[in-house]
Amino acid sequence: MDLLLVEDKDSFRRLLARALEGSAWSVRAVADPQEALRALEEAPSHVLVTDLRLPGMSGLELIRRARRLRPELRIVLMSAFGEPRDIVEAMRLGADDFLPKPFDLDAFLALLERLRALAGAPPPDPAEPWIAHGAAMRALDEALGRMAATDLPALFRGERGTGKARCARRLHALRHPAAPFLAVAAATLGPEGPDPERLRLLAGGSLYVAGLEHLAPGAVLPLARAMEGDSGRGIRWMAGLDEGATLPPDLARSFGPLEVRVPPLRERREELLPLARLLLERAARREGRGQPWLERAAERQLLDHRWPGNLRELAAAAERAVLFSDGPAIRAFPALGRDGGPVLCLPHPPVGTLEVQLRTVLRSAEGELLRKALVDADGDLPRAAEALGLTPRSLGQRLRDHGIPLEDGEAPPGNCP
């Protein structure tokens, strides 16, 4: 993993860099905060460690600008002169921790190890909306509350795209919201099973295995053994399984204790309008537009539509409604009428050299194409991989690189439908 160290005192900067030699960290060490920002523009880092007092710019200002460039960045602020108000401001800006100088190198390395786990497997946002108005979702919510009192493996069964991964994130947040959380697609697991290094980093956190119906026969025993191994016993395991699919006996024993059914959208009609409003708000925010609102005709169109079991069609309808509306009022949902053609929309890259901007645009385009392939394949990872000319494991890695969840139907929509 990549670490960017910003410290203007040469001797201390060299000391910290030497302490990380031979570790899992690839270190870029600089003295100038402007140089640090240029480094972040050129290439991402997983963790930023910065002093508070720097030449030409405070550590707090560096944190503010760095988070604009790389919102996913994990940050540590260090200082011998940190006032409580500075620490509070750093945390408000998104810093993960504060180290008062002088500090013990072992404590520094232990903190980085924790951040390495969180950078590789960030916990879900505990404020992610959870809508449970109808009887089916209220029953599910009550079941998740009971499950949260245990660390037993949990199995979420339901039709593709009903939100099994969302339920896993909800359960994780109820159990231990600040711990690492990782989702992997069962189709990407080979005969060697889950990566032992990832399991070690997930200690105390959760691992969600999406699409167990796609697990290769040769990966069944390795997965079961990983769950029972030393690293596996320190992890809360969760998995998603398609409605009607069956588990091999070895995994049925592992995931047997806790199983819950996730209701399809057609059984959640009480939540259609709240879900639509939430998805419309997200789509408008991505487009830099104000709060949208539904006119009665659009509400009737949603309620009269014969919805399938998943949320994917509703998300696409919301995206296109915002795209083709000429103001905050949503009068109709073009996607439900199948009029209009799909377009590829990309965010404008941050200001920088042409080469840097082109790299940013190319990466954005790759993410959009991956999302579209996943949607076109109805969330079926192996089918999407085949359409793209990739292996399921290669596609899974690319999705992880773009921060796209691997659960079918859970990939966040892009800038356009």
Image (cartoon, rainbow, N blue to C red):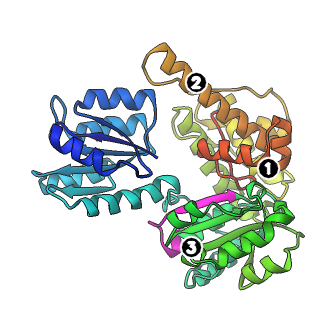
Report how far apart the C-alphas of labels 1 and 2 lie in the structure. 25 Å
Q: Amino acid at mark 1?
A: Leu
Give the vertical position of 141 relative to 352 (above or below): below
Magenta span of residues? 173-184
Q: Amino acid at mark 3?
A: Ser
* Extreme residue toward the top, this view: 354
- Callouts 1 and 3 close, C-beta under 8 Å: no
Left or right, residue 415 beside residue 128: right
Q: Residues within 10 Å of mark 1 (few under 14, many from 20)?
A: many
Q: Amino acid at mark 2?
A: Val
Visible residue check, residue 135: no
What residue is pinned by disc 1? 381
What residue is pinned by disc 3? 231
Using the image as rendered, state which of residue 136 and residue 18 is in the foreground: 18
Q: Earlier along the polypeptide chain: callout 1 or callout 2? A: 2
Q: Earlier along the polypeptide chain: callout 1 or callout 3? A: 3
Left or right, residue 110 beside residue 297: left
Report how far apart the C-alphas of labels 1 and 3 lie in the structure. 27 Å
Q: Residues within 10 Å of mark 3 (few under 14, many from 20)?
A: some
